[in-house]
Image: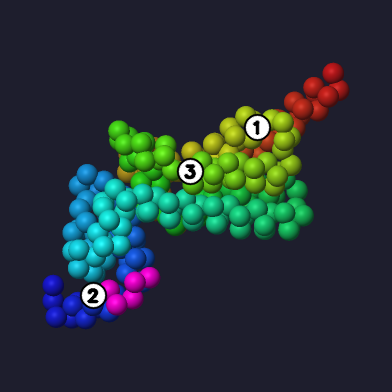
Amino acid sequence: MTATTKPKSRERERNPDRSREHILDAAEQLFAEKGYEETSLADVGKLAGVSRATPGYFFGSKAELHRAVLERCFADVRRAVREGKARALASGRTPEVILAGAVADYAEFVASRPNFVRLIEREALSDRTVLEGMPLRTAVWEEALAAFRQELGLDISDTAEAAHLLFSLVALTWFPIVHGQTFLKALGLDAQAPDFAERRKRHLTTLLLGALRERATNASTWTES
């Protein structure tokens, strides 16, 4: 550690709240990039600009730090869900316009938090059960589903249809982040191209609007029959 970085490290450790956030930021980046097994508390401390022992002081163990990182990510998701719901309900717009806004909001959210997507993907491919024992994860997705149904005016009794629509939105926005270097390149697409994000949002909106309109048509047909 150089002489110029030591004062910064000491300053951070004198501010507990700031130190905790720096540690969480560093841990999120490392767990996403290297994975849980390949990341040590010493690695986190080094990247966070604090002493090797500081992450353990704040979080106790690597497992608890990892859990805290995931919980902070899901808290961010819940905050975004609530903000999006408030905007949608206050707008008084049609379900089609609200859906387009939801697509844009969520696409921008995951694009600005690629580490969150990679963290969840790593958990899905591992043998760990951290997410299964995390009540906040379940609560967040239940709240997201309820908000989605309320914003779009979907039939309260048809939970499965709304869940499929929300799942499609999540899956189709995550895929380019996870497979930007694999499937997308093979298809001649570049996730870093200036127009990719906007074209992707328009495409997803068209797909999901089609599903929403088909559902409305079917519901009308069933009612008439």
Q: For the magenta stretch, what is the residue range?
A: 13-17
In this rendering, which labeled residue sits more in front, label 3 or label 2? 3
CA distance for labels 2 and 1:
50 Å
Q: Mark 2 or mark 1, which has the lower sequence index?
A: 2
Whether residue 206 is visible here, answered yes or no, is no
* Residue 205 x %, y %: 61, 44
**Label number found at residue 159:** 1
Between 9 and 106, the one lying in front of the other is: 9
Specify whether 140 is left or right of 47: right
Q: Pinpoint residue 193: horizontal percent, then vertical percent.
A: 42, 53
In the depicted structure, whether residue 38 falls above or below residue 55: above
> Crowdedness of circle 2 by 10 Å Cα count: few (<14), some, many (20+)?
some
Q: Are marks 3 and 2 in contact (CB under 8 Å)?
A: no
Q: Amino acid at mark 1?
A: Thr
Residue shown at 19% from the left, 77% from the top: 5
Query: Which residue in the structure is indicated by mark 3?
Result: 135
Q: Which residue lies at the image location 43% right of the left edge and 55% below the top edge?
A: 72
Residue 9 circle label: 2
In percent of width and height, residue 164 lies at 58, 32
* Left or right placement of residue 1 versus residue 172 in this view: left
- Residue plotted at (23% across, 77% down): 10
Q: Which image quadrant: the N terminus?
A: bottom left
Q: Report the front residue among 137 and 115.
A: 137
Does residue 90 appear in this view? yes
